[in-house]
Image (cartoon, grey):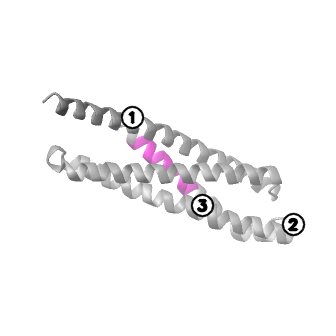
C-alpha cells in the first residue's frame, strides 16, 4: 500500500519536471526564432550573408528545430497521457491538448522547411552569384514569411502555456 502513493508521487514529480523542461524549451525556441528574424532583417539590408552570419543562422535554426521537435514529442506524450486518463480530464483539457499538438506539429514542419530547404536554397544562390540580388528577391519572401509564421507559432504556444 505504501508503494502505490510513492509511485503516484514519482509520476507527479516527473510530470512537473517535464512541464518545467517544456517551458524552458519554449523559451529557447521563442528566443531562437527572434534571433533568426533579426538576422533576416540584417541580411535584407546588406543583401549578403557573411560566413559568420551563415554559421550563426544555421546553429540557431538547429536550436529552433530541435526545440520544436522536443515540444512536439512532449505534446505527443501529454496527449497520450490524457487519452489514457480520459475519465479524469474534461473536454476543454483534451481540446487544448489537441490544439497545442496541432500547432507544435505545424511548427516542426515549418522549422524543418526553413532549415533544411529554404536556407539551403538561399546559401546555394549566394554561392553561385556571390550576392543575393536577384535570387534574394525570388527566394527571400518565402524565407521571411516562414520565419514570421514560426515566430507566431512559438508565441502562440508560449502564450497558451503561460495562460494555463
Q: Is residue 128 above or below residue 161?
A: below
Q: For residue 103, which quarter of the picture?
A: bottom left
Q: Is residue 73 magenta?
A: no
Gap between marks 2 and 1, in whole Å? 48 Å
Q: Name the secondary structure under disc 3.
A: helix
Badge nearest the viewer, 2 or 1:
1
Q: Reading the chain from its start, which is encountered first: label 2 or label 1?
A: 1
Total labels: the figure holds 3
Image coordinates of residue 86 in percent, x first then y, are 18, 50
Residue position marked by numbered label 3 in the rendering: 145
Res 17 label: 1
Image coordinates of residue 61 in percent, x first then y, are 63, 53
Main SS of the magenta segment?
Answer: helix
Quadrant containing the N terminus is: top left
Gap between marks 3 and 2, in whole Å? 24 Å
**In the image, is 49 to the left or to the right of 28?**
right
Magenta-tinted stretch: 148-160
**In the image, is 43 to the left or to the right of 73?**
right
Residue position marked by numbered label 2 in the rendering: 130
Image coordinates of residue 31 in percent, x first then y, are 58, 41
**In the image, is 125 to the left or to the right of 91?**
right
Q: Is residue 150 magenta?
A: yes
Q: For residue 118, which quarter of the picture?
A: bottom right
Amino acid at each position: 500500500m505504501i508503494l502505490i502513493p510513492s509511485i503516484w508521487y514519482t509520476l507527479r514529480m516527473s510530470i512537473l519536471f517535464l512541464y518545467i523542461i517544456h517551458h524552458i524549451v519554449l523559451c529557447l525556441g521563442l528566443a531562437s526564432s527572434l534571433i533568426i528574424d533579426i538576422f533576416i532583417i540584417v541580411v535584407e539590408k546588406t543583401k549578403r550573408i557573411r560566413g559568420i552570419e551563415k554559421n550563426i543562422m544555421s546553429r540557431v535554426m538547429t536550436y529552433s528545430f530541435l526545440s520544436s521537435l522536443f515540444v512536439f514529442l512532449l505534446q505527443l506524450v501529454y496527449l497520450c497521457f490524457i487519452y489514457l486518463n480520459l475519465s479524469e480530464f474534461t473536454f476543454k483539457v483534451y481540446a487544448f491538448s489537441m490544439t497545442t499538438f496541432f500547432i507544435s506539429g505545424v511548427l516542426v514542419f515549418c522549422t524543418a522547411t526553413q532549415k533544411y530547404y529554404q536556407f539551403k536554397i538561399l546559401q546555394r544562390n549566394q554561392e553561385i552569384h556571390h550576392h543575393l540580388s536577384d535570387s534574394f528577391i525570388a527566394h527571400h519572401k518565402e524565407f521571411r514569411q516562414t520565419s514570421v509564421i514560426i515566430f507566431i507559432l512559438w508565441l502562440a504556444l508560449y502564450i497558451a502555456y503561460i495562460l494555463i
